[in-house]
Image (cartoon, grey):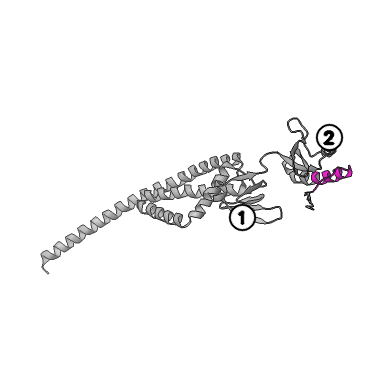
């Protein structure tokens, strides 16, 4: 190798080393600025997220959201806000975020297709939370089942029947189907049919039944909710009266059962006949 060639190689080596050092310095400075900016965004983002969560929590508390659903939505909102903050920090550091977003979007579509039923139940839980057609402790009838609501979960609602069976109903069908809520109103009307034999004086029947009504403090007797005993039908073997009584929703079953039994005892003790189905057969002799 000649002296000229050696000088050229040394000159190129020095030049390349200088360029590499300069690039390294520039990259370090840029990275340092990005890291500082990312740290500022992180702490600023945490502060903003804290303020947002306080506002959201106050709104949920004013709405009286169930404790289990409150904690779920609190966690969901927190995770979502921090996810947005992380994406922003990644972008500031110079890392390509479009690939991350595309990856999460693809994963979301795949998961959504695989869990369509579960997501429907989740959406149903959100609808129940927002519109509140019933609450824990209410007695409802829905999806062919009736019972007391024990727990409203994210995907299911748990009710207990009167014979202590536990029924788990998916929120998807529950939020889109018909719901009969027996506990949403403070008072309920108790209807009791009383059948007596033809020939019975209606005034005697009402006198006996009114004594039962007046003696029961659970039966409401205020204006607009007065008890009534109309004659509603003349059936094949009997005339039918209906006791229409108002009581607090919590007392419905007790008033229904107690009044039915007391009515039977009082009517029979007064000699008022309670008939059963009868069929008259007439025989004709052709001789």
- Quarter of the image with the N terminus is bottom left
Residue 45 on image: x %, y %:
46, 45
Residue nearest the observer in this picture, 91 or 63: 63
In reply to whether residue 278 is colored magenta, the answer given is no
Q: Is residue 2 left or right of residue 123?
A: left
Identify the mark at residue 203; answer none if there is no mark: 2
To which quarter of the image does residue 8 belong? bottom left
Kindly report the distance in space between the C-alpha atoms of the residues bearing marks 1 and 2.
50 Å
Q: Is residue 12 left or right of residue 108?
A: left
Residues at circles 1 and 2 in contact by the CB criterion of under 8 Å: no
Which residue lies under the disc numbered 1? 168
Q: Residue at x 24, y 59 (%)?
A: 17
Which portion, as a residue range, is magenta? 259-277
Q: Residue at x 39, y 46 (%)?
A: 37
Q: Indicate which disc, 1 or 2, sits on the residue closer to the N terminus.
A: 1
Please identify the residue farthest to the front as the structure is shown: 287
């Amino acid at each position: 190798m000649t002296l000229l060639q050696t000088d050229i190689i040394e000159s190129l080596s020095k030049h390349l080393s200088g360029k590499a050092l300069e690039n390294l310095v520039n990259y370090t400075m840029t990275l340092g600025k990005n890291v500082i900016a990312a740290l500022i965004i992180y702490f600023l983002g945490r502060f903003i997220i804290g303020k947002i969560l306080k506002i959201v929590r106050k709104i949920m508390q004013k709405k009286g959201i169930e404790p289990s659903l409150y904690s779920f939505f609190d966690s969901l909102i927190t995770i979502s806000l921090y996810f947005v903050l992380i994406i922003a920090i990644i972008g500031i550091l110079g890392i390509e975020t479009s690939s991350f977003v595309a990856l999460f979007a693809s994963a979301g579509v795949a998961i959504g297709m695989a869990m369509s039923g579960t997501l429907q139940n989740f959406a149903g839980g959100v609808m129940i939370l927002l519109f509140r057609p019933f609450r824990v402790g209410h007695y409802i009838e829905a999806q062919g089942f009736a019972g007391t609501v024990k727990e409203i979960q994210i995907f299911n609602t748990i009710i207990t029947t009167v014979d202590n069976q536990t029924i788990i109903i998916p929120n998807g069908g529950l939020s889109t189907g018909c719901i009969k809520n027996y506990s949403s109103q403070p008072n309920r009307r108790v209807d009791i049919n009383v059948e007596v034999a033809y020939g019975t004086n209606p005034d005697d029947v009402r006198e006996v039944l009114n004594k039962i009504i007046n003696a029961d403090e659970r039966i409401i007797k205020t204006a607009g909710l007065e008890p009534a005993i109309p004659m509603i039908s003349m059936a094949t073997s009997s005339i039918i009266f209906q006791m229409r009584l108002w009581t607090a929703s919590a007392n419905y079953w007790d008033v229904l059962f107690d009044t039915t039994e007391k009515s039977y005892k009082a009517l029979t003790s007064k000699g008022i006949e309670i008939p059963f189905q009868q069929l008259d057969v007439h025989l004709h002799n052709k001789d």
